[in-house]
Image: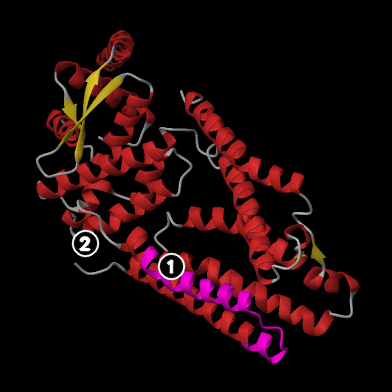
């Protein structure tokens, strides 16, 4: 069965992102060699990044694009509707069990309707509206997105610890707590965690499948923006601090412990708030 | 019948509870039954109602494989569902009587 346009875009975006990362790593490697700053750890680190980039494409294919056992039973017309419902539900703040249950229910309903000869349009109508109606039965509109803030905290912590580890691995002789991250990078992680990821998740419910390019496009725009202000406004102290002002985000063991503890606490609160919101429906 | 209005959705909820009271039913079958009764509804209308009734614990579910493959959810009525159905019947009887009275009054006015 042919791949839908939506899935083609998803796959193409993941390939493009992987190529961008690989190109950046190669350019960085060239720069490091030219400055005689290369060491074995840099090689290993860049090798790992390239390997992860390459692996990310089949991962996207298997997790997002490949049709599961019963999804193959749907015709293209039905599948196009189903994948919008599925993606909307999967990117919502419902629990994993609720998402799985809805996916199975919708699949059974659509397969039954298809077997009876009904057109997909007559069965589902607008798939976005349908998915929205289902989500409303779990919590009032506008309530579940509150949980995106907790997700944002977890993403942000993950990015900070992850990037600190990468930086430390490159200069393993120094203490982990001496690693510093540029303010521009912290800003990027903040925007990514609290704005870009929730917005992209929200947009996956729309027919416009070009939204999958949004994270990559934002990354490119951010880098371009940083380079333009570096070229024209680097004389300004604020710009210099923004671009190259390093901050120790994990300065000691206490802060590291706090970051690590924050993840289970966030998960607990998320689960608690979700249950409260579910009880709040009438 | 336009199934988008809140009043119809409320009526559909009551009718679904009544259908489920008579026999254990799955989503697609519920749509078929309602259409036979004349509601002209599709899956997009009925499934969210079933989910809402399940979340309110008016319906309990039993999952079994369908003849086509994926797991199928069969709905049956809970004690709370039976109470809700009774409540719906009482409200419906009251509204039906009021509406009939209004309509008959209208007819009488016209005859005068």
Colour mapping used in the image: secondary structure
At a point 27% along the width and 26% down the height, the residue shown is B12
Tell me which segment is drawn in magenta.
A30-59
Q: Chain of mark 2?
A: A
Q: Secondary structure at mark 1?
A: helix
Residue identified by numbered label 2:
A76
Quadrant where the image shows the N terminus of chain A: bottom left
Which disc, if any, is residue B71? Answer: none
* In the image: residue A176, left or right of residue B34: right
Residue identified by numbered label 1:
A56
Q: Is the Cβ of the residue at disc 2 closer than 8 Å to that at disc 1? A: no
Residue situated furthest bottom in the rendering:
A34
At a point 18% along the width and 21% down the height, the residue shown is B19
Distance, label 2 to label 1, CA atoms, is: 26 Å
* In the image: residue A114, left or right of residue A48: left
Question: Was residue A55 drawn as part of the magenta stretch in this picture?
Answer: yes
Query: Does any portion of residue A145 appear in the rendered image?
Result: yes
Nearest the camera: A14 or A174? A174
Query: Does any portion of residue B15 appear in the rendered image?
Result: no
* In the image: residue B67, left or right of residue A212: left
Q: Secondary structure at mark 2?
A: helix
């Amino acid at each position: 069965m042919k791949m839908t346009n939506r899935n083609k875009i998803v796959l193409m975006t993941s390939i493009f992102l992987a190529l961008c990362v690989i190109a950046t790593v190669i350019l960085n490697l060239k720069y490091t060699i030219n400055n005689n700053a290369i060491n074995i750890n840099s090689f290993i680190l860049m090798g790992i990044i390239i390997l992860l980039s390459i692996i990310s494409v089949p991962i996207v294919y298997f997790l997002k694009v490949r049709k599961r056992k019963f999804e193959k039973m749907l015709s293209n017309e039905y599948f196009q509707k189903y994948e919008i419902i599925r993606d909307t539900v999967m990117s919502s703040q419902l629990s994993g069990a609720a998402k799985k249950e809805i996916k199975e229910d919708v699949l059974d309903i659509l397969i039954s309707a298809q077997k009876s000869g009904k057109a997909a349009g007559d069965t589902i109508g607008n798939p976005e509206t349908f998915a929205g109606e289902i989500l409303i039965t779990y919590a009032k509109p506008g309530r579940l997105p509150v949980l995106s803030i907790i997700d944002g905290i977890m993403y942000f912590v993950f990015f900070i610890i992850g990037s600190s580890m990468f930086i430390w691995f490159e200069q393993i002789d120094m203490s982990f707590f001496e690693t510093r991250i540029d303010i521009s990078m912290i800003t990027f992680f903040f925007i990514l965690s609290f704005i870009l990821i929730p917005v992209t998740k929200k947009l996956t419910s729309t027919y416009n499948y070009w939204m999958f390019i949004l994270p990559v496009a934002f990354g490119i725009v951010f880098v371009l923006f940083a380079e333009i202000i570096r070229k024209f406004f680097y004389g300004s102290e604020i710009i210099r601090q923004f671009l190259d002002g390093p901050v120790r985000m994990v300065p000691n063991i206490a802060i590291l412990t706090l970051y690590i503890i924050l993840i289970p606490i966030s998960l607990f609160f998320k689960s608690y708030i979700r249950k409260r919101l579910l009880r709040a429906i009438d | 019948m336009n199934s988008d209005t809140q009043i119809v959705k409320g009526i559909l909820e009551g009718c679904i509870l009544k259908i489920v009271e008579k026999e254990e039913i799955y989503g697609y079958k519920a749509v078929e039954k309602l259409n036979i009764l004349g509601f002209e509804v599709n899956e997009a209308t009925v499934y969210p109602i079933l989910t809402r009734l399940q979340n309110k614990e008016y319906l309990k579910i039993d999952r079994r494989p369908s003849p086509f493959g994926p797991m199928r959810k069969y709905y049956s009525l809970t004690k709370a569902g039976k109470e809700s159905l009774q409540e719906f019947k009482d409200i419906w009887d009251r509204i039906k009587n009021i509406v009939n009275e209004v309509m008959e009054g209208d007819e009488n006015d016209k005859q005068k």
